[in-house]
Image: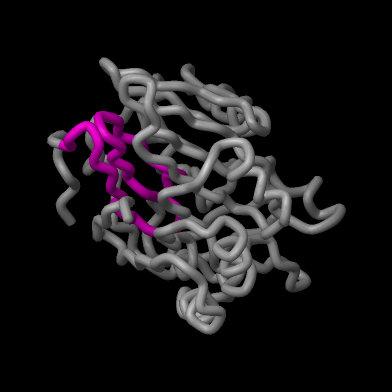
Amino acid sequence: MTVPQDTTPDDDVTLTFGGTATTLLRLGPFTLLTDPNFLHRGQRAHLGYGLRSKRLTEPALQPTQLPTLDAVLLSHMHGDHWDRVATRSMPKAVPVVTTPEAARCLAKRGFTATADLRPWQTHELTRGTSTLRVTSVPGVHGPGPLARLLPQVMGSVLELARDGEVRWRGYISGDTLFRPYLGEVLERCGPLDVLVPHLGGTRVPPGVLVTMDGRQGADLVELLKPPVTVPVHYDDYSVFRSPLGDFVAEVAQRRLPGEVRTVGRGQTVSLRA
């Protein structure tokens, strides 16, 4: 796989898919990595409380392939979103935008530049006349009492602005279940150019749903009405029970507006309509 080089024009926005929720985002002059998961096929991710899940696919991104990063965006601290390879390999001074809980965990591992966001707080990166604003969106990783046992999770609205004008806006859901309050994304931030939902229909014993399946993913598309949807996090681990086809079929059956733009591991897609 060839990682795009540092030649992105100021308003270009692309996503290179590494597998699971790991993506390399080129947002104008900014380069971000999301949820770094570098484990190989057959290795197991630790999910807490003695739970582990086997990786079923090969990742398309490895630490040695990464360009210089402006930041890492981490939705939550789970072994399929930040793994032991990331802890060993990522520079300890790389900025990581994440939840307060994950920031504390990374600080104990020697990472020195974490930005911990609570719901609807923002963090900004600046380069020249361009600004990338990250707004934390609340999420729920499990229903009822289970939510208190699972890690804090956040989605992220990313806004690319130049000379003070927003040129592009995208929402990465993080590992959340669908909830109607996610419509606040539009109320607080404005209309989206792209939605990147974490799907997979992840289930933990005794079969409890903890990430959106195809139906809930379609619910989110129906709620937010993005022009483009790029689904990720759907077939890499044994706990994922709802394949990408479930989501694509549900969106088609409902005749929802916008385009579902699928991307294979190692491929790069535009995040513009």
| Residue 236, picture quadrant | bottom left
Q: Is 101 within the magenta?
A: no
- Residue at left offset 16%, top offset 34%: 6
Q: Is residue 190 left or right of residue 26?
A: right
> According to the image, what is the colour scheme of the structure?
one colour
| Residue 188, picture quadrant | top right
In the picture, the quarter occupied by the C terminus is bottom left
- Per the picture, the main secondary structure of the magenta-coloured stretch is strand
- Residue at left offset 70%, top offset 67%: 209
Asked if residue 92 can be seen in this view, the reply is no
Q: Is residue 46 left or right of residue 94?
A: right
Give the extent of the magenta segment.
8-37
Q: Is 33 within the magenta?
A: yes
Q: Residue furthest right?
A: 145
Q: Is residue 152 above or below residue 201?
A: above
In the picture, the quarter occupied by the N terminus is bottom left
Q: Is residue 18 above or below residue 97?
A: below
| Residue 18, picture quadrant | bottom left
- Residue at left offset 61%, top offset 30%: 105
Estimate the x, y position of residue 164 in percent, counting from the top left: 38, 21
Of residue 4 and residue 120, the one placed in the foreground of this image is: 120
- Residue at left offset 45%, top offset 37%: 158
Asked if residue 236 can be seen in this view, the reply is yes
Estimate the x, y position of residue 239 in percent, counting from the top left: 59, 68
For the image shown, how many numbered marks are present on the structure? 0
Estimate the x, y position of residue 196 in percent, counting from the top left: 46, 54
Of residue 2 and residue 260, the one placed in the foreground of this image is: 260
Estimate the x, y position of residue 141 in percent, counting from the top left: 69, 53
Q: Is residue 244 above or below residue 176?
A: below
Of residue 33 and residue 83, the one placed in the foreground of this image is: 33
